[in-house]
Image (cartoon, rainbow, N blue to C red):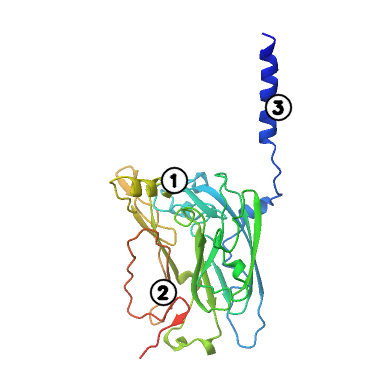
Amino acid sequence: MKISPLCIVLACVSLSNCVTVQTHSLDEELYYKDDYKTHPCNRPCEDQAPPRLCRYKWVVENYWSLSKACLDCPFNQSDCFRPHCVSTDGVQRGIVSVNRMLPGPSIEVCVGDAIEVKVYNELVSAEGTAIHWHGLLQKGTPHMDGVNQITQCPILPRSSFTYRFKALEPGTHYWHGHAGMHRADGLFGAFVVRQPPSREPHRSLYDHDLSEHVILVNDWLKGMTLPGYLKHHHSDELTMPSQMLINGLGAYEEFKDGNRSVYTPRASFTVEGGKRYRFRVISNAVVVCPIQVSVKMCLHKDFLSFEIS
């Protein structure tokens, strides 16, 4: 009987030591950053204009689709576009996000700009992470390529890392997580590097090159990717995506509003008759099946322009 109180005290001391963790100070304002569409570096690119320093702060965290931030989505469609509302295809599931967005914030800059992205790892899953800049060759900055365990150690939980490099390759690129299944679970976004019209080989083919015409396509599972990956490789069942998302939007799950069926919103794009628009299409496909997009004319692939006869 005399031993029991001592055991209880020791257990409490041990638990106290386990939960006392030194963490970095994270500005709460980071969770309320916008999508950077109004970032000063997203501007018309001009000849002889000096390059700019483009800074971003990203919080990587585990998040939830159709969370309480969505209020009455999809019955009130405007609620589906509230800050922090990630509606995806209407199926509630865990995701990995930057700034509680899917896709994550776009980076849109001019060629030659210096990029600085401070990434905070707030994953409650206690995983390390890294961000790879797909299409950027990282000349002179190979250590900023973001390939986990090759060009850098992972960004540990409750810590941060700042990527610094120059955007030297004009074209349509994208960024994505490069650790575990993060890319498949939502850690990706567009990276567009524009150049002055005088240096753009196909500038005569379009009138407008707008941020809202960047299209990011990805395949999407009903749940977190890791269980699906394990089932696919260690059982007789194939794991195939239930949906394709366009700019994070899709309509799969049916909601009932009386006798009316309601779905989460699909992506839409606005154009004006008589005008010519450049659409930039990015694939974040994860499974082995390729994504086919049919268009009348392609101008470039990655940062390599096609010759148009």
Q: Looking at the picture, does residue 302 appear above or below residue 182?
A: below
**Circle 3 residue:** 13
**Circle 1 residue:** 93
Q: Between residues 291 and 77, which one lies in front from this camera angle?
A: 291
Q: Secondary structure at mark 1?
A: loop
Residue 148 visible in image:
yes
What's the CA distance linking mark 2 and mark 1? 33 Å
Between disc 3 and disc 2, whose residue precedes? Answer: 3
What's the CA distance linking mark 3 and mark 2? 65 Å
Q: Secondary structure at mark 2?
A: loop
10 Å crowding of disc 3: few (<14), some (14-19), many (20+): few
**Circle 2 residue:** 271
The amino acid beneath tag 1 is Arg
Q: Is residue 43 left or right of residue 276?
A: right
Residue 277 visible in image:
no
* Residue drawn at point x = 60 percent, y = 61 percent: 152
* Residue drawn at point x = 53 percent, y = 88 percent: 199
Q: Between residues 53 and 29, which one lies in front from this camera angle?
A: 53
Quadrant of the frame with the C terminus: bottom left
